[in-house]
C-alpha cells in the first residue's frame, strides 16, 4: 500500500527565521492535510533549523553540505519529495487555509492539467500592493503563449503534477531539466513556461497566496539579472522548440521588450538615466510603460524605490503592451 502523501510542499531556506514560523503555520492550517513539507536548509546560521525541526513528522528536514544557488536547492529538495503533486512555498510567504484543497480538486478533475495556481496578494507589512490576477488575467488549458505574454504564476502559488515536472528531464541538457541552475532570478518562470508548453494549466480565482515584498526580496534587486535571464530563456525556447520564432512572434517581441524594460530599470536604479533612455529609445511614446520609465529616468536613482512601489500599485495604468518604432 502506498503511504506517500499526495502533496509535497517544497520550502527552501537560507536564514529565514524572521517569517519562517508564520509561513510553516500557514501550511499546518491547511484544510487538506495529506501533505508533507520537504524543508531544504541551505546552511542557515540563524534559528531556522530549530524552528523547522519543532514541527514534527509532517516536516522532513534536510540540510545541504554547502550553500548552493536557489535553483540547485529546489532541485535537491524535489529529489526528496514523495508526493503526487509538488507545491512550493517561499519562507516569507503565506497560504490561506483552503489553498491546497481547492488546487488538488482541479488536478483530480482533469488529468491533463500539469500546473495549478491561485491569485496572489502582494503585500508589504500591513499594506496590500496589488492582486496578481488584476494585472495579468489567467488562462486555462493550453495557454503557453498567453502565459509568456501575461505572467500570472507566482512561486508560492504554484502546484505542479509530478509527471509534468519529470517530463522536463527528457532530452534536456539544462541541469537535469527541472530548475535551471544557471538562472538565479527567473528559474521558476522557466519551469512554468516549459510545463505550459506541454500541459494544460488551471487556476483558482481566489487570493489564496500572499507574497511578501520587502527590502531583502529580489523583486527590486538584481534587476540586471532579470534582463540577462529573460534573454537566456528566449534563447532556450528557440533551441527547444523548432519554429519557435515563426510560431510565437508576439512572444519573442514581448520577451525582448520585457528584457529591455528590466535593463533600463536597472540602469536608472544605479543612477545611469541617460543609458537607460538609450535602451528605451526604440519604443514608441504610445507605450505607456516605457514612457513612464523614460520620464522617471530623469530623476536621481534615490527615487527608484518609491516609484517602483507606485508602479506595483497601479498595474492597469501600464498594461499596454506597446510596440517598437518602425
Image (cartoon, rainbow, N blue to C red):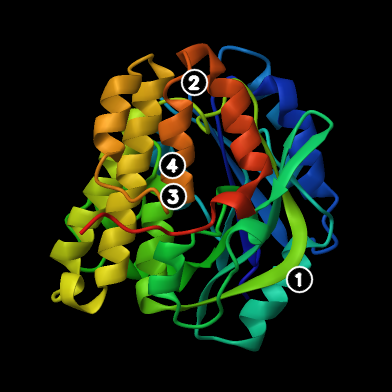
Q: Is residue 77 left or right of residue 13?
A: left
Question: CA separation, marks 4 and 2?
Answer: 44 Å
Looking at the image, the residue that sits furthest to the front is 285
Label 2 vs 1, first from the N-terminus:
2
Residue to which mark 3 is pinned: 188
Label 1 vs 3, first from the N-terminus:
1
Q: Residues within 10 Å of mark 2 (few under 14, many from 20)?
A: some
Question: CA separation, marks 2 and 3?
Answer: 21 Å
Quadrant, the C terminus: bottom left
- Indicate the position of residue 34 as horizontal and vertical percent values: 74, 63
Label 2 vs 3, first from the N-terminus:
2
Toward the viewer: 311 or 189? Answer: 311
Q: Is residue 71 left or right of residue 139?
A: left
Q: Residue at x 49, y 20 (%)?
A: 43
Q: Which mark is residue 102?
A: 1
Q: Residues within 10 Å of mark 3 (few under 14, many from 20)?
A: many
Quarter-of-image position of residue 15: top right
Question: Is 194 located above or below residue 278 in the figure?
Answer: below
Residue to which mark 4 is pinned: 291
Amino acid at each position: 500500500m502506498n503511504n506517500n502523501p499526495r502533496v509535497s510542499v517544497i520550502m527552501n531556506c537560507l536564514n529565514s527565521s524572521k517569517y519562517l514560523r508564520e509561513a510553516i503555520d500557514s501550511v499546518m492550517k491547511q484544510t487538506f492535510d495529506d501533505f508533507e513539507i520537504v524543508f531544504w536548509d541551505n546552511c542557515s546560521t540563524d534559528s531556522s533549523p530549530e524552528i523547522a525541526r519543532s514541527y514534527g513528522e509532517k516536516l522532513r528536514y534536510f540540510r545541504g553540505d554547502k550553500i548552493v544557488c536557489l535553483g540547485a536547492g529546489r532541485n535537491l529538495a524535489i529529489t526528496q519529495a514523495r508526493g503526487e503533486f509538488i507545491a512550493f512555498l517561499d519562507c516569507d510567504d503565506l497560504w490561506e487555509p483552503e489553498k491546497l484543497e481547492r488546487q488538488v480538486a482541479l488536478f483530480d478533475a482533469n488529468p491533463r492539467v500539469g500546473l495549478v495556481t491561485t491569485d496572489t496578494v502582494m503585500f508589504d507589512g500591513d499594506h496590500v500592493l496589488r492582486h496578481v490576477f488584476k494585472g495579468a488575467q489567467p488562462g486555462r488549458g493550453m495557454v503557453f503563449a498567453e502565459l509568456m505574454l501575461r505572467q500570472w504564476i507566482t512561486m508560492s502559488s504554484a502546484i505542479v503534477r509530478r509527471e509534468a515536472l519529470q517530463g522536463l528531464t527528457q532530452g534536456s541538457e539544462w541541469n537535469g531539466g527541472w530548475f535551471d541552475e544557471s538562472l538565479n532570478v527567473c528559474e521558476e518562470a522557466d519551469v512554468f513556461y516549459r510545463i505550459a508548453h506541454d500541459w494544460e494549466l488551471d487556476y483558482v480565482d481566489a487570493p489564496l497566496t500572499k507574497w511578501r515584498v520587502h527590502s531583502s526580496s529580489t523583486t527590486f534587486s538584481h534587476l540586471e539579472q532579470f534582463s540577462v535571464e529573460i534573454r537566456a530563456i528566449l534563447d532556450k525556447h528557440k533551441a527547444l522548440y523548432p519554429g519557435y520564432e515563426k510560431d510565437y512572434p508576439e512572444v519573442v517581441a514581448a520577451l525582448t521588450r520585457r528584457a529591455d524594460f528590466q535593463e533600463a530599470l536597472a540602469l536608472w536604479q544605479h543612477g545611469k538615466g541617460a543609458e537607460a533612455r538609450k535602451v528605451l529609445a526604440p519604443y514608441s511614446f504610445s507605450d505607456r510603460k516605457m514612457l513612464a520609465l523614460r520620464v522617471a529616468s530623469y530623476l536621481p536613482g534615490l527615487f527608484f524605490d518609491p516609484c517602483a512601489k507606485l508602479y506595483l500599485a497601479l498595474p492597469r495604468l501600464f498594461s499596454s503592451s506597446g510596440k517598437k518604432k518602425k
